[in-house]
Image (cartoon, rainbow, N blue to C red):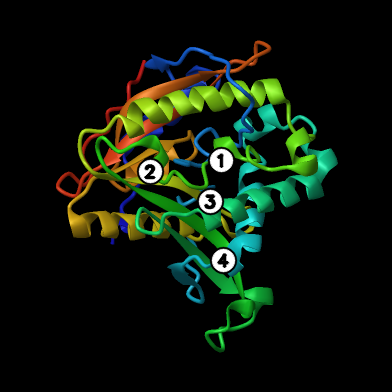
Amino acid sequence: MLWLRTVNTSTSRLHSTLARNNGRRPAAVTLPAMHKPFIIIVLCTLHSITCAGLALFTNGARTPVSNHKLRPAVEDDLDDIVTVFIDAFRPSAGWQYAHLRDDDYTNYTWTCTRQFFQGEWESLHRSRTFANVITVPRDGGQYFSSDRAGERVVSFGVWNWMKPQEDAADSSFSFRPHQLHAALGGKCLEHLDVNTTRAADLAQQLSLAVEKYIRNLTEPQLYLNLLATHPDWDGHGFGAEQVEAGLQEAARVGMPVTLLASPDGWPLYDSLGFRSLANITHEMFDGLGTLWSEYMRWDEEEPGAPSALIVQ
């Protein structure tokens, strides 16, 4: 199994480099700040997960949980998915940077996020996107039947099948967290829980990265759009299990897998054989420095290929 591999020495080099640079990656690619009409941002790739990118991963010492399931997501899972999404991303640097008033609007944030996910689910292109969840018995019980009422979603992943020369409108980039709340009405349009200037600017920078490294492809690929594990269930290897499921799908049809990884997500992907191809620096306002993400790729014929990490 891929998840039995240990993180290679390049992970240690990454941590040493981060320490020397106050937690910031050496910048190989800098995207200019640009402005456009407001789009709410909740950066999975800029979180301590990928999102690719961008889920929380603490897979160094894994504690297996035997009583869990990995299965396709269904609409009834959305309440749990939203809770996982918010609780996983809230501690991240990107979320904290954009959500200055988040603690004052907990219910508001959940409600607006839930409405957004419902809309994305209803417009999902099932032939181009698939989503998996990992569930455990609710309240510590046991699985007794196929009734999902007794299950709790603790991890989810969203994947996109991508093709060259595909129109942006047809590429099915559902659940893009950098567009959160964009199409909602009512109170959600007021974006009470965020700093709209910061959020819109980060959203634009992330869109540029997605356009350059994901949409600008020359071959079919499977893109890991979003991955999150609830922090209460971090450390059980659920993130790795989700990724392995995607790798199996890609290998079945002979496609590479791509993603934009965050600092905390990078070690997991590196340990699973992803190669680092480019570093992307996202500038923050108010002199707060930079956030970074990593464009990474996995090819079946090159498991465990040496990392392209630039160490200074």
Q: Amino acid at mark 1?
A: Pro
Q: Please, which residue is most extreme toward the right here?
A: 104
Residue underneath mark 2: 170
Q: Amino acid at mark 4?
A: Glu
Residue underneath mark 4: 75
Indicate which label's residue lies in the foreground, 1 or 3. Answer: 1
Q: How many marks?
A: 4
Residue underneath mark 3: 228
| x, y percent for residue 20 | 49, 18
Between residues 88 and 192, which one lies in front from this camera angle? 192
Residue underneath mark 1: 177
CA separation in Å, label 3 and label 4: 17 Å
Q: Amino acid at mark 2?
A: Asp
Residue neighbourhood size for the residue with mark 1, other residues' Cα within 10 Å, grouped as few (<14), some (14–19), many (≥20): many
Of mark 1 and mark 3, the one earlier in the sequence is 1
CA separation in Å, label 4 and label 2: 22 Å
Residue neighbourhood size for the residue with mark 4, other residues' Cα within 10 Å, grouped as few (<14), some (14–19), many (≥20): few
Of mark 4 and mark 2, the one earlier in the sequence is 4
**Residue 142 as seen in the image, left or right of residue 45:** right
Residue shown at 33%/35% (left/top)?
296
Name above or below for residue 34 compared with residue 309.
above
Is any atom of residue 17 visible in this view? no
- Helix, strand or loop at mark 4: helix
Residue 223, quarter of the rendered image: top left
